[in-house]
Image (cartoon, grey):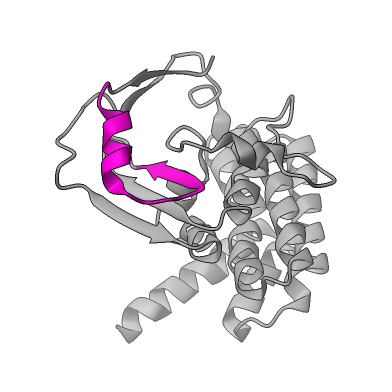
């Protein structure tokens, strides 16, 4: 297993005390500490509000991961053509599932209280170059784009596109800085960029400056860095 969960003995009574009927409780968990749960933060979202949390500052990490959530098993047993499951052989498998589970929920409860421990082992995928195993992460982003589009969720589609268009660029930057970017990786990341840019980004409305900046990566990474640096300097001067 990638992690160990040590359940707080009081968690059942705590959920009962909330008095919130939900399909998908969400825990805010702090590693290795049980704190007082008497004054915890409680929020209830509908599915669109909860999905939008992915795209807040730091939200993709906290909202998308599986380890800080408790699911009602009925969500995995939906009477539909495709059951929701964690795909076998995928890294970042929560990227393929969490958004669907949340979308199928009528209400989602967020509880800012540590109810169990989460422990990562040293050799887990979260510790061993998880940031450079890019194929599955980008595939999941493209899958989310297609899902939101199929549901006519224009706002969520735009939020996801704003995130996913940067995925191949971010992985390119990380691997280039670490000097582990092979020719094969460059070709693969550029191919992902072209798919997202041509099939999704170009067909949506964006400010001219953003279109220029994102489009410049298709010409060269150095041009993208130059335009990004200029834009950052210009914005700082304006402040």
- Total labels: the figure holds 0
Q: Quarter of the image for the N terminus: give it.
A: top right
Query: In the rendered image of this protein, does residue 236 appear above or below residue 3?
Result: below
Q: Quadrant of residue 208?
A: bottom right
- Please state the horizontal and vertical placement of residue 149, each as a whole percent of the image: 75, 67
Question: Where in the figure is residue 206, as x and y percent of width and height?
Answer: 63, 81
Magenta run includes residue 26: yes
Looking at the image, which is closer to me, 60 or 38? 38
Q: Is residue 169 above or below residue 75?
A: below
Q: Quadrant of residue 84?
A: top right
Near-viewer residue (83 or 198): 83
* Image position of 187 (left or right of 169): right
**Highlighted range, magenta:** 9-27
Residue at image position (42%, 36%) is 68
Please, is residue 139 above or below residue 132 in the view?
Answer: below
Is residue 47 located in the magenta-colored stretch of the structure? no
Q: Is residue 237 visible?
A: yes
* Residue 114 seen from this side: no
Judged left or right of residue 81, residue 83 is left
Q: Quadrant of residue 33?
A: top left
Q: Residue placed at 77% from the left, 51% from the top?
A: 192
Q: Is residue 93 left or right of residue 26?
A: right
Quadrant where the C terminus lies? bottom left
Question: As rendered, which of 3 and 186 lies closer to the eye?
Answer: 3
Residue 233: x %, y % from top left: 40, 74
């Amino acid at each position: 297993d990638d992690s160990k969960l040590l359940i707080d003995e009081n968690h059942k009574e705590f959920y009962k005390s909330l008095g919130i009927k939900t399909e998908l409780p969400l825990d805010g968990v702090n590693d290795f500490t049980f704190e007082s749960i008497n004054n915890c933060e409680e929020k209830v979202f509908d599915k669109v509000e909860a999905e939008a949390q992915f795209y807040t500052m730091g939200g993709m990490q906290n909202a998308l991961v599986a380890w800080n959530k408790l699911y009602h098993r009925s969500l995995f047993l939906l009477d539909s053509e495709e059951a929701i499951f964690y795909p076998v052989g995928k890294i970042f498998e929560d990227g393929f599932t969490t958004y669907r589970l949340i979308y199928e929920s009528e209400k989602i409860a967020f509880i800012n209280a540590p109810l169990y421990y989460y422990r990562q082992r040293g050799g887990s995928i979260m510790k061993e170059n998880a940031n450079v195993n890019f194929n599955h992460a980008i595939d999941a982003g493209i899958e989310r784009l297609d899902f939101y589009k199929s549901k006519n969720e224009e706002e969520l589609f735009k939020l996801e596109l704003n995130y996913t268009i940067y995925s191949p660029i971010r992985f390119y930057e990380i691997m280039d800085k670490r000097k582990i970017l092979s020719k094969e990786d460059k070709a693969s990341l550029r191919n992902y960029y072209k798919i997202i840019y041509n099939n999704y980004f170009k067909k949506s409305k964006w400010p001219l400056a953003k279109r220029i900046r994102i489009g410049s990566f298709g010409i060269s990474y150095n041009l993208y860095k130059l335009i990004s640096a200029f834009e950052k300097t210009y914005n700082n001067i304006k402040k």
